[in-house]
Amino acid sequence: QTLTDSVNVIQNYAADNTQTAPSATDYVVVGVTGIDANNLSEVNSQVDGQSLTTVAAIQTLTNSVNVIQSYAADNTQTAPSVTDYAVVGVTGVDANNLSDINGQVDSQSLTTVAAIQTLTDSVNVIQNYA
């Protein structure tokens, strides 16, 4: 029953973010690892925004969120890839701007999709202008 309840909370939230937001415990119960207080809000935002309902999709999202947040806190950690940014919902990151994006994610300690998307949009405007 606990598993069913957690699945329902996640699926209901993915369909309608006015429903109860999943807790870290809900994700653990369904088998998603790596979710904690530091990334729960960002994961929930993307579960809703991308309508993610499968454990595999949520785990992939969580892994990419964690790569980005770890790198933002400590640039000796694995650098985010173009794929990591795409998985979390950031558009406009490619091989031409990845280094610049990662540099700013690190130096500004950017950990939210919204902040990274704003940065990416600005980097692309600057690079296109140049």
Image (tube, rainbow, N blue to C red):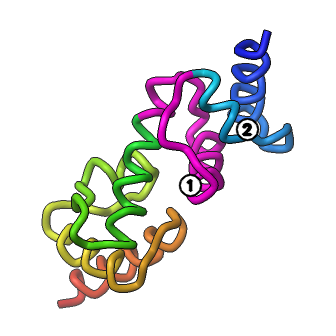
The amino acid type, in three-letter code, at marker 2 is: Pro
User: What kind of element bears circle 1?
Assistant: loop
Count of numbered badges drawn on the protein: 2
Residue ID at (47%, 75%): 118
Q: Is residue 53 left or right of residue 119?
A: right
Q: In this view, does 6 lie to the left or right of 36?
A: right
Q: Nearer the viewer, residue 116 or 40?
A: 40
Residue 2 lies, in percent from the top left, at 77, 16
Residue 110 disc label = none
Q: How far apart are marks 2 and 1 (CA)?
A: 12 Å
Numbered range of the magenta stretch:
31-59
Circle 2 residue: 22
Determine crowd level at label 2: few under 14, some 14-19, many 20+ residues with C-alpha closer than 10 A.
many
Please identify the quarter of the rendering in which residue 37 is found.
bottom right
The amino acid type, in three-letter code, at marker 1 is: Asn
Indicate which disc, 2 or 1, sits on the residue closer to the N terminus.
2
**Relative to residue 60, is residue 11 depicted above or below?**
above
- Residue at the farthest top position: 1
- Is there CB contact under 8 Å for labels 2 and 1? no
**Any magenta on residue 34?**
yes
Please identify the quarter of the rendering in which residue 5 is found.
top right
- Residue at the farthest left position: 96
Determine crowd level at label 1: few under 14, some 14-19, many 20+ residues with C-alpha closer than 10 A.
some
Residue 39 disc label = 1
**Relative to residue 73, is residue 62 depicted above or below?**
above
**Relative to residue 1, is residue 108 depicted above or below?**
below
User: What kind of element bears circle 2?
Assistant: loop
Residue 22 lies, in percent from the top left, at 73, 38
Q: Which of 39 and 60 is in front in this view?
A: 39
Residue ID at (38%, 82%): 122
